[in-house]
Image: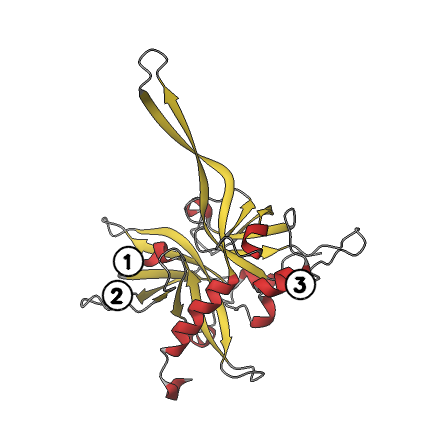
Amino acid sequence: MAHIPPFFLDTVIAIGAKNDKDELVWIGTGFIVGRESEPDSNKFHTFLVTNKHVLKDQKIAFFRVNPQSNAKATDYPIVLKNDQNNVFWTGHPSDDIDVAVLPFSTGFLKAEKMQCAFFEPKHIISKKEMIESGVSEGDFVYVLGFPMNLVDNERKYVIARSGVIARIKNYLEGFSKDFLIDSFVFPGNSGGPVINKTEISGIQDTKFLQRACLIGMVQSYIPYRDVAISLQTKELRSISVENSGLASVIPTDFILETIEIAYSKIPLDKK
């Protein structure tokens, strides 16, 4: 039995950029979210969601998607900033909320016979729903993306890693803007979706989510810094930085806030 709906994998996009040698390198992950044009209309404007830090230094990015056939994946260039420094993506207005969204045409991809899907509102859980559903420390999650630039040469194959929510109460109680998961993430995972794992609780009177849904987006791993001090001189000799295995996750409420800002910029005749 699949814990992750298969179409969730088709929402995930590999993001690349050209280096100084004009080589395409993979710098992060994104995923597609749909914003309904009108309530219950079943018509959506779709947006690519990722981190600000993935896009901010790029003028052109490349997005890898798979054809519906078994043919080789296709890389599509998208202009992020023009020569006049006009930026075509929208960031969350708070500097400490690392969310960027970009209008992204799934209709174009489908016309090109590409595999693509998007998270609808019913696939996304808000902070309010988290509280009502009893989301808590220890709940299982999956992280989808492309750690360590592991993008296949022929096709786009998403890598799923498992973990648990390590700390979320401080977010749910309003004392933090992120929550922590216990799951190894690496460069390349930035901007990837975090999915809850559906569970059947054996504890009486414990609420739980009965469906897999988007609960947030990877921001970065939490580094562990080990400081070496000379026993003789008491001076700092070195600092080593390691991956602690904990990662910061941006909750969906901030993603949806940014999408609303981006949606407000769309001309009325195109809504």
Of the image marks 3 and 1, the number of the one nearer the N terminus: 1
Assess whether mark 1 and mark 3 are in contact (beta carbons under 8 angstroms): no
On the image, numbered disc 3 is attached to which residue?
Answer: 132
Asked whether, in this view, residue 112 is left or right of residue 179, the answer is left
Viewer-side residue, 91 vs 119: 91
Q: Are marks 1 and 2 in contact (CB under 8 Å)?
A: yes
Residue 254 x %, y %: 47, 63
- Classify 186 as above or below 77: above
| Classed neighbour count for the residue bearing mark 1: other residues with Cα under 10 Å, few (<14), some (14–19), many (≥20) | some
Looking at the image, is 118 positioned above or below residue 57?
Answer: below
Q: Amino acid at mark 2?
A: Lys
Residue for point 64% across, 52% down: 136
| Residue 54 point in image, percent of width and height | 36, 55
Element type at marker 2? loop
Element class at badge 1: loop
Image quadrant containing the N terminus: bottom right
Q: Earlier in the sequence, mark 3 or mark 2?
A: 2
Q: Quadrant of residue 100?
A: bottom left
State whether residue 199 appears in this view. Answer: yes
Disc 1 target residue:
58
Badge nearest the viewer, 3 or 2: 3
Q: Give the left or right position of residue 144, taking residue 264 as reference.
A: right
Q: Which residue is mark 2?
A: 81
Q: Earlier in the sequence, mark 1 or mark 2?
A: 1
> Which residue is found at the position 42% from the left and 49% from the top?
188
